[in-house]
Structures are given as C-alpha cells and as structure tokens.
Amino acid sequence: MKALVFERKMAKFAAAAVAGRIAPGRGAQVGPLSLQDIDEPELPGPGWVRVRPRLAGICGSDLATIDGHSSRYFEPIVSFPFVPGHEVVGELDDGRRVALVPILTCVTRDLPLCRWCGAGQPNLCEHTAFGHLEPGLQTGFCESTGGGWSIAFVAHESQLVAVPDDLSDDDAVMIEPTACAINAIEMARPGDTAIIGAGTIGILTLAAARLNRGLTNIVVAAKHPAQVALARKLGADRVVSPGELAATIRSRTHSMVVGDRLTGGCDNVIDCIGSEASLAQALSVVAPRGNVLLVGMPGSSTHLDLTPLWHRQTSLRGAYAYTPAHFQTAINLVRALRLGRLVSATYPLSRYREAIEHAANAGARGAVKIAFDLRSEKGR
Amino acid sequence: MPRPGFVLDVDRSTPPLLFWHGEGFRLERLPAERTRVIYPPEPLDPLPHPDAAIRHALLHPLGDSKPLPELLFTGMKLTIAFDDISLPLPPMQRPDVRQRVIEAVLDLAAEAGVDDVHLIAALALHRRMTEAELRHAVGDRVYDAFAPTGHLYNMDAEDTDNMTFLGTTDQGEEVEIVKRAAESDLLVYVNINLVAMDGGWKSTATGLASYRSLRHHHNVRTLQHSRSLMDRHNSALHTSNWRMGKVLIDAGVKIFQIESTLNTDTFPPPFDFLMKREWEWTAKDRALFVGSSKSLARTPNRLARQIFHSIKAPHSMTSVQAGEVDAVHEETLRNVHRQQLVEVEGQTDVLTMGLPYIGPYNVNSIMNPILVMCLGLGYFFNLYRGKPLVREGGVLIMSHPTPWEFHPVHHPSYIDFFEQVLSETTDPVRIEAEFEKDFAEDEWYRHLYRTSYAYHGVHPFYMWYWGAHALQHLGRVIIVGGDPRSVRRLGFMAASTMTDAFEMASDVVGRTPTITHLHAPPLLLADVK
C-alpha cells in the first residue's frame, strides 16, 4: 500500500533541519519522509481493527518533525520507521466512519492501567514505550500501528469514536485538534485571557474558549490577515498583531510598565505557537500568579529567563492532547461552529511535498488546515 | 505695504505649485481653468516697539478692567499662566512674546511689592515642557529666578489636590482648573494668538483645566458643531468655553488677560522662499528649492526632522491687548483677521493642501499619522469662516508622507490608539463611546503624563474629534505620498501621485471637479462667501 514513511536516517534528518530553517516545510524535499509502497501493518491482537483513512490532517507537530525541529525528548517514545498522521477520519471495513483518538495508552498496549490511565487521564500514560507495541506516544509516531498518511493503519477499538452522519469528512478531521484545544481551555483559570498564535490550534482554542464561561476579555495575537478575520468571526474580543499584544494587554488590564514588562497582565496566556519568542512573550504579559499554558509543541531547545516566573509566582503548564471524553465535546463544538470550513486544501499523497509546504506556510497563504485526501487513492 | 491675501485662478501659464510634504516639498501642476489657489496675506509690519506696546497695553486695559498696576498689591497671590509649547508654530526666535510680556508683568509686580508669584505653563492635557522649552518661552532670567524655587512649573491636571472645582455651567458643564490660579488674588494669562481659535475664555477654561472639565467641549458632538473652530461665534467649542468663563467670573476668579498676535513671517532664510508666490521665485529661490528638495530626499528622516525642528520663526508681534477677557479677545480677533483673512467666493468640489512637518502637538517631536489627520482635517480644513472651502460630499486631498512612526515618550497613548482603536473603527462617535473612558482613566498614561513628557491618555481622542466635522462633511479623504498602511488605518485612501489622487476622487466628484488649493503655511483664514 502507499504510505508516507518517516525513517531514521540521520543525514537526511540533518538536511531537513537545515532546509526547514531556510524555508518552512522544505524538510519534506530532502528529509527522511518519503512516499513508499509498504505492507499494511499487522493487527497487533484482539480488539484491533483496520482503518482506512478518508482525510488525514497535517499538524504542527508533524511539521516540526519533518523540518527537523522536534525535540530529542521524543526519541524513546517514538519508533522508526513510522507513518505520520494522527488527525484522522477514516472508515472501518463495515463502512462506519470513525475519528481516531491517537494516544497509545495502557489499554492499547495490553498493560495494567498506570495511575493516569486509571484516573481517566490517558494523555499522561506512563507506558508509551512499553507493552506489545513498539514505542510511540500516538498513532502516527509508532511503527506498530501505521498512521493516517497511508491507505490503511491499525487502531485499537478504544481509539475510535463514531462520526455522526451530519458531520462531513472535513468536520470530522477537525475533531482531534479541537479536542486538544478543549483540553487546554479546561486548564485555564477564570479571568482575562490571551491566545498567542492563530494557526489551527490557536483558532480552535479560541473556538473552544466559549466552553469556559470564566474566560474574559479574550485577546488573540494573529499574524496574518486571514487569521485576523477568522479570529474576529470566532468571537475574539480583540485581535492584534503579535507586536501589539503587550500594549493591548497593558491597556486592557490597566497595567503599568516597568522596563519592558507589565506590572499586571492576563490571568491566562495560552501559547499556541510554542517557540522561544512566543513563550518569552507569554511570560512578559501574564499576570502575577497567572497561568501560561503551552499548547503549541515547543521546539528542540528553548532558552528562557525564568526569573519573572519565579518572582511573580507564575505557573507554566503544558497542555498535551486530551482524553477520549474530550472527543464528544469536540464533536459538538465542530458541529456547532461548522469547523470543517477550516480545512483549506487537501492533497493526494503523491503531492506530499506541496502539501507539507502549504501547511508550513498556511497562515501566510490564507489557509488554516491542510490535509491529505485518501478517499480516491488507488488500493483503498 | 504688505500685500493682502490673494486668490489665483490657475491657467496654463501658472507654474507648478508648492505643496508641503512633511519634512519636504512637492511641486504639483493643478488643472487649469478649474483650480484656484488661496495665498496668505504677506506678513504685516511688526509693532515698532513691542516692549513699549506691551507696557501700554498693561497700563491701558480694554473692557471692564483696571490697569494692571492697580490690581497689584503687597502680600497678594499673583499667578501668571502662559500658553505652552503648542504655540506659536514654528517656535519663534528669541525673545519669545511670552518672555517680553511676563517680564513686563513681573516688573510691575516688583514695583508693587508682590512677592508671592507663581508662573504656570498652561498645559491642560498636553505634555510637560522641558527645561529648554520653558527657558525658550519665558527667557533665562525669568526661568532662573523662579524655577529653582519651584515657582515656575508645568501644571498637572491629574494632581487632584491642586485642582479645584468651581461649579457647573447652565448646561451642566463642570469647571475645574488649577487651584493656585483659581485662588490667587489675580490670574494673569499670557496668550499667543497664532490663529483665531486661540485665546479668549479658551485660555483659562481649557488651558488650565482637567479632563473632568475638558470632556464637556472636547467631544464629538461639540466639535461637529464647531463650524468652524476658527470662527468663535459659530463654534460650539468656544460657546462652551465662554459658558465656563462665566462660571469662573461667578466663582470670583479675577483674570487679567493679555493676548498678542503675530504676523505670518514664518520661515527664516534660507526657507523664506516658502512664503513667496511661485511665479515670483527668483533664480536663487528656485536653486534653493531644488537644492533643499534634493538634499532632503537623500537625508535620513530623523536628520531631516532635526533640521526642520531647529527652525525658529521670525514671527513679530502685530498687536498686544490686555484687560477684560471678552474685550481683549474681540480686539485680538480683529488683529488676527487683519493678518490672515482672505475673501473667497464659494466652495469647490476638491480641496488640496500640503501638510508641513509641524503642528501644535509635535513640536520637537514626530508628526505621527493621528497628528497628520488632526492637522489636515482638524486645523487646515477649519481655516474658514462662513462655509468650508470644499462642498459637502467633496474630496480632500492632502500631501504628507504619513509614516507609521510615533514618538514613544511624547505620544504613548497615540500608539495604542492607532493600534487598538483605529484598527477597530474610525467612527468618532463609536470611538468616543467605546474607548475614551478607558484611555482617559488609564493609570499608566496618567503616570507618564505626570512624570514624563507624555500627552495625556485621552489626547489622541481629542485629535480625532478635532477632525470630526471634516469627517462628517467630506465624501473622501486622499493622502498623496503617504505610507499606504498608515493611510488605510486612518480610514483614508493613499495615492502615489496627485494625478492618481484626482483619479481616485473622480468617482466622488466626477472627472472635471473644481479645485481649491490652500497654499499654507503661512497660515490664512478663508472668509468663504
């Protein structure tokens, strides 16, 4: 079957890192991702089924991996070669459409439940490198399961959520990133809130913010005109350019300025980019005892002056993934806001380089979500 | 004998016309047979003996006022308030009129044995003046005698302990001014009237007032009904100030008003060719124009700004009058009109103007886009009496580079206004309703106004309201040579050339509109019949 395969080839990985720095998405031209004809993955055991993807999205974490920016932290919890793709709407052999909950947990690994899986927090599973599967924190980073950028992959029944008939495939492929955003929003505290970044995850975080009635005065820092327009449509109280964020938060929170930082700030700053610059900005505009939520996946190394974090008793928390329960909420939100409209373009696997480049430059090109369309691929 | 103002009908022999363009100039050909150019009158002859004229005014007051010496006595509290850095434009060569007047007042006060004297820069919500600016205004002798002991200072409209509420007008307008001025036995106000808008009760009721007071006339409704700001008897802004003046009188504030007018001798050599009519330029003038234009084009903006802001105008005093506010101001207006009034017949479809590098709020500073709007739509558009020079629904074409650039110390709230308010709306009514209060009461802006050299948080709103009448009147505003991003943020259209601007105007006023070019500065006041 046709699949995009990411292999452990250090020279190509280095080339991708260089190319990715020159231009976002260029890692796909020279890196370890390639279109191959491979065998379909074996079903690992009882409770596993074969899923044939219909649409599979390209996520920021995929782009970081392809452009060689991702952290070495992941090395022990991924297994090569793997087929990327974890934002998936697919169909089962009986024709039912499903959305994938890609996190690979104790249940999928046929292990006794760790304390997090037992507590209904499988996104914090302690066993992502163990059990009868190869290491992999999610489908799309695990050799054993395959991933959504292919004709077929395998998934455990616990990973599947039925897609209601009234949702289109475009809607359905947005369920997984929407669940991510909902998880982040649930971690926010009541109060003034800033969202840094208006790519897919930033926009979805804004969309999810309506679920948390305690969030007030939501300011979004958006870089590109289409993002600004979208953030306004989705109900941001203010949309500003990244350079204007500090001044806006200063005036909205009636802060003073000391040196280059605010005396007050927002109660929540949700960083949907994850870069060194965005994190530093988040720390400079968060209120004392405020909450910086890191939703965008950070790069391979981040240098930050943590003195303000210490001095102002600020918390810095990651917001990774979701629980299966978030998927039902996500379905409702996707339906209510017709979030399928955020799918800006789809590509066949054969045009993966264009797709990756488009996704890496989505904001500048007026796009939000780019996905692979597997519905008419040969061999399905 | 100086020549009066002049309206030129452009024909094919008319040379290209000078347009100010920020820290530079443009020469533009305007269409023949349907364009007229309004030139200001030539500078009036100055008073031959200004110091004697000042002393004469103090000893022979107008209206219901005693001569100044009779108002001065030992043991009294005397406060001398004076206009701030926003006047005159450009700042005048030393000695400044304020210095001459203040020295004369102080001489009389000394003769009367007055030793409790405060000198207050009447800033209202403008930025504080620096030591150098204060020295320039009042002179070194006065500064050195009063500033070190804390008797010469910038007012602070946010110092609630030192402001005093005096009552409300019959329209419910609150009047609050500097306590020292209100509680003195005599308040002497030293004014400079550069344009007809200045002076009268606006000196005290605006110059010494707080936001609490100012918001009653510095608002959209009032400014939309000030037609024009330069016509005191048809200006809602002035009517409100006059009502406040009555409250001051009723509260027992004793005011001795000293107003002076200046001639339009605005630019010293080598820039004096800017005051000439183009067809009268000599070969030397043309060479100066070409030389200065070319060298300015190669000069970094910052340096060009420094060069222009170092210009000190050779303005001379044409009149000085003192005494009771109303009587003084009527005489002042007569003298302003004597210098600036130009009779103009009717309106045209288009009004063109070149905006210079300086306005009241960017002395020694940067003309940011909001100030460009204010200078064009607030000040130059309002240089009329009777009717605007352009018909209702007509087009205003201004020339200015309009850079997206702000002075971070002087204009911090302008930056936020531009980024946060104008990005949402340019409608003055909405701006006032949704944003003004937050900016006016913002502690950070208050802090910067009080301790740094920043205009008050609400000041950019007032700049926008200043143009509210023009915004309501005009069908389109086009800025030639402006940074397109800034111009769009202002809600206007950007044109690269004057030809493009007329093309853009054509869908509002047709392809053969009538045009008026306001050839200023030097300043004029069009009396439109």
Image (spheres, rainbow, N blue to C red):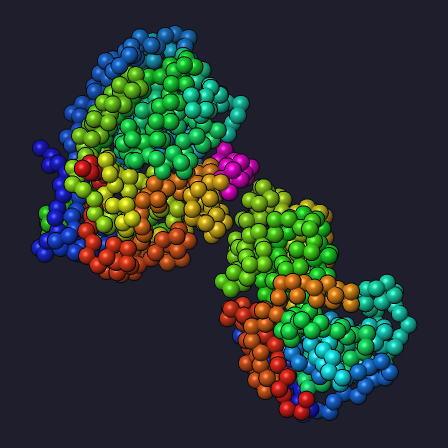
Q: Residue at x 35, y 23 (%)?
A: B242
Point out the residue furthest to the right here. Answer: A112
From what the image shows, is residue B435 above or below residue B506?
Answer: above
Residue B151: image quadrant is top left
Question: Which secondary structure dominates the residues rendered in magenta?
Answer: helix
Q: Residue at x 71, y 51 (%)?
A: A189
| Residue B200 visible at all | yes
From what the image shows, is residue B73 above or below residue A68?
Answer: above
Choose between B115 and A245: the one closer to the eye.
Answer: A245
Q: Position of residue A301 (x, y in %)?
A: 66, 67
From what the image shows, is residue B62 above or below residue A131?
Answer: above
Q: Position of residue A81 (x, y in %)?
A: 72, 84
Q: Which residues are magenta?
A: B434-453
- Image-based side of A261 in relation to B137, left or right: right
Q: Residue at x 69, y 69 (%)?
A: A175
Residue A297: image quadrant is bottom right
- Any magenta on residue A18? no
Choose between B184 and B270: the one closer to the eye.
Answer: B184
Q: Position of residue B85 (x, y in %)?
A: 36, 34
- Any magenta on residue B442? yes
| Residue A8 visible at all | no
Point out the residue furthest to the front here. Answer: A166
